Structure formats: C-alpha cells, structure tokens
Image (spheres, coloured by chain):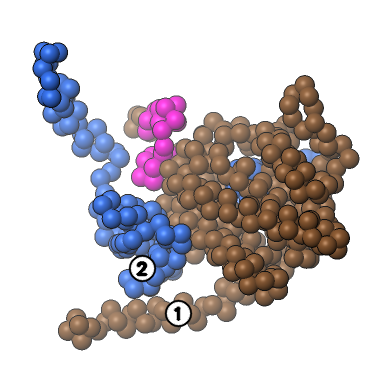
Chain colours: A blue, B brown
Amino acid sequence: MSTPDLTAAGGHGAVPVEGVPAGHRSETPASRTDWPLWEVFVRSRRGLNHQHVGSLHAPDATMALRNARDVYTRRSEGVSLWVVPADAIVASSPDEKDSFFDPAADKAYRHPTFYEIPPEVQHL
Amino acid sequence: MSTSEDESTEAFEALLAADDRIEPRDWMPEGYRKTLIRQIAQHAHSEIIGMQPEGNWLTRAPSLRRKAILLAKVQDEAGHGLYLYSAAETLGIDRAELLDLLHAGRQKYSSIFNYPTLTWADMGAIGWLVDGAAIVNQVPICRCSYGPYARAMIRICKEESFHQRQGFEILNTLSHGTPAQKAMAQDAVDRWWWPSLMMFGPPDDESPNSAQSMAWGIKRFSNDELRQKFVDMTVPQSEVLELTLPDPDLAYDEGSGHYRFGAIDWSEFFAVLKGNGPCNEERIEHRRRAHDEGAWVREAASAYAAKHAARPAAEVA
C-alpha cells in the first residue's frame, strides 16, 4: 500500500502535508482582507515589564484590548495589557546583525569581570 | 547559489546545529517555511474544528459544574487556534487565506475530529485519550526550532493539562458510578482508544517526511516513539479507572519495560483521512456556515471602527 506522506508533529494528530498548499506570501500581512494586526504585550504582575506574547486581528484598539484579554489572559496571566498596531513597530533586521550589534562585541571593559582585583579585596 | 545565499544557508544551519531558535525575520529555506506553514495551519485548523465534537454536549452537560468546565475547555480550543494562526502569520501568510484553504478542503485538520460524540462519556474519553495523545505529541514541539511555534506550544501545553485531567475525572466518576454509567464509560473508551493511537501517524518506516522534519528540528521524536510513550503512560491510568482498553494483545513486556499492543487497522485511518469518516462533511459544513453567518458581525465591527476613525479628535474627546 502506498502511504501518503503524513506527520504527527502537528499536535492533534497525523495530517497529510505533501501537496498541501502553503498559501501566498504577503509582504503586508496586516493590511489585506483581515482586520489590522495588533501585537500583544502582557505585564504578568506588578514590578515586571510588559512582555510580548503574540498577536491578533481586531478592527480597532478597543476590540483589540478586549480580544487580547480573552485570548492571552484567560488564567489571570496579566494585570496590564498593551496592544500595538503591528505596522507601528520598527525592528532591526537580522541581516544587519553583525554590523548593527558589533560595537558591543569588542568592549569587554564594560563588564565588571574585565578588571583584575587582588583576591583579598572584599565587597568589590 | 549566490554567495549571500550560501552565507544565509550557513547561518541557518549553524543556528539549527546550536539548537538555537529561528525567528520570523531570519533567512530560512523555502521548504522549511512551507513545511511550518502547512503544519502550524493544519494544527490551528484542528484546534478550531475540535470545538465541534465537544460543543455538541454543551447544552446537555449533566451539571452546571460540568457545563462551566466544558465551556472553558471549548473556549481554550478557540484560544489555541488563535495562538497558532498568530504563529503561522509570522511566516508571511494571512490568517484569512488559511481559513479559505480550510473551507475549500485544501488544507486538512486532524482526522480524530471526524468521529462523532455519541454520549456524555465521550467528553471524558476525548479529554483523557485524545488530549492525552495531543499532549504527548505537543510537548516536544515546545522545543521546535521555530521560535513563534515553540512559544505558542508552551502556552497550549500548560492549558492542555487541565483538559486531560477534567476528562479523566469525568470517566473516573462514571466508572465508579452505577453499572449503566460504567458501561457508558467503557463504550466511550472502546470507541476512542484506537483512533487515539492513530493520531500519532503511520509507523516510522512509512513516514518518509519525518526525517526532514527531524533534521530541521521541527519534529523531535518519531511517530512510533511517541505512540509507545502514550501507551506506556495510559495503561496504568486505565487500571485506576477500572476500564478495559479494547486490545487483547496489550501486555507489559518485562524485558523492554514497555507495553506491547496489537496491530492498528490503518485502513480505517486512511478511509477517514480520505473523507469517509462519520463526520467529515458535517464538520467542514458547520465551519463554513459559522464563518459565512458571522460575516455581518465582522463587517459591522469594521464599519464601526471606520466611523470612529473618521471622527474629528475633538468629538471623540
């Protein structure tokens, strides 16, 4: 029997992957047929930073907040939520990685371990 | 291949070799991107189609407690679908297009959801066996090489644990109830056991695609390894439930420390996959209808947003 190519890695069970369309690449995913895309940030408790948790589509900011509450904080995961229009985020490109982050690489003297201190010195 | 593409491939391979994560804006081979889109999309589709067999019992749950729990579980499935569509979109695909592909039958969902939920005990068997199998499948994906998929899986796995435990509790209550309740629990386990084992996919020697997925760090264990793990975890649990798993060949093998199980009827699996399961048409038809009949809500929300965006700032204040 010839077996269709299947993978169980898709979580809820084996589904064929061979010959399945993977859609079309869209350069502006936030702007096509769907509602705008919002990136969601959650502060899990007081004293911590907001952290990125994912995204969602919503027609406006109010709905984005309400949907973010229902999607990302069903189990009291947050005390504060931010939603940010995805196209408002400016990101560094991984292609720039070397040159962009290079200036930090050769400045070991910015770290406390760079300095030689006599072993008998305390509290330093 | 140009020099820059060589360098990109090298950087990609280096990240994989270091067991580091690939992130959305990294260069990645087209095959890797497409494999992930197919897998994440079909995983997302499975989550939202998976709401239907359980939604079937929402209005008939035997108590308010059970009803509230089932509602929370079905809501979680919607949430899991959304986490996954969100992860798929980081690969440069629109959720709207993925839904179109599902509705057109060009992308699939897990065959397990093409079985009917005939009794209340099926809510228990789905939670215990189907979600149990899903957890075994999903835990390794928390270490998937693609960052957004791995992060979505971490959230999902935390929530699946509640799903499995509530299923076990339903069956445990029934199996220690009246004889009729125990029979109902046994019948559900009889029907869901084999389809749950099939969820892990065909045996390793018939899964040629797995090798590439493993090399890419998308898949971490083979179908047979995961299936064995699930059986080993589940058999002792069935003893606590005092329910029988419908396999006369099921036996503990002292030598290997594993439970050996009987042959799986793959002809049933492939028949359901081809569209000949009990509920294939009903599931996709229901999904299409919900999408079409909800169109006016989406349009109204867009119109409301447009109206408020157009208002002068002073008026809003």
Residue on which the image places disc 1: B299
| Residue A51 image offset from top left, x and y in percent | 32, 52
Q: Nearer the viewer, residue A16 or B78?
A: B78
Left/right of residue B43 with respect to residue B188 in the rendered view:
left
Assess disc 1: are there few (<14), some (14-19) or many (≥20) residues with their C-alpha within 10 Å of its C-alpha: few
Q: Residue at x 57, y 34 (%)?
A: B220
Q: Residue furthest bottom?
A: B315
Disc 2 secondary structure class:
helix
Q: Nearer the viewer, residue A25 or B207?
A: B207
Q: Residue at x 12, y 20 (%)?
A: A122
Q: Residue at x 83, y 62 (%)?
A: B178
Question: Of tags 2 and 1, which is closer to the observer?
Answer: 2
Residue on which the image places disc 2: A65
Q: Amino acid at mark 1?
A: Glu
Would residue B316 be seen by someone viewing this image from the given angle?
yes
Q: Residue at x 45, y 56 (%)?
A: B86
| Residue B81 image offset from top left, x and y in percent | 53, 59
- In the rendered image, residue B15 lying in the magenta stretch gets the answer yes
Q: Amino acid at mark 2?
A: Leu
Task: Please give the range of residues in magenta.
Answer: B8-28
| Residue A80 image offset from top left, x and y in percent | 31, 61
Query: What's the distance in space between the residues labelled 2 and 1, CA to CA?
Result: 19 Å
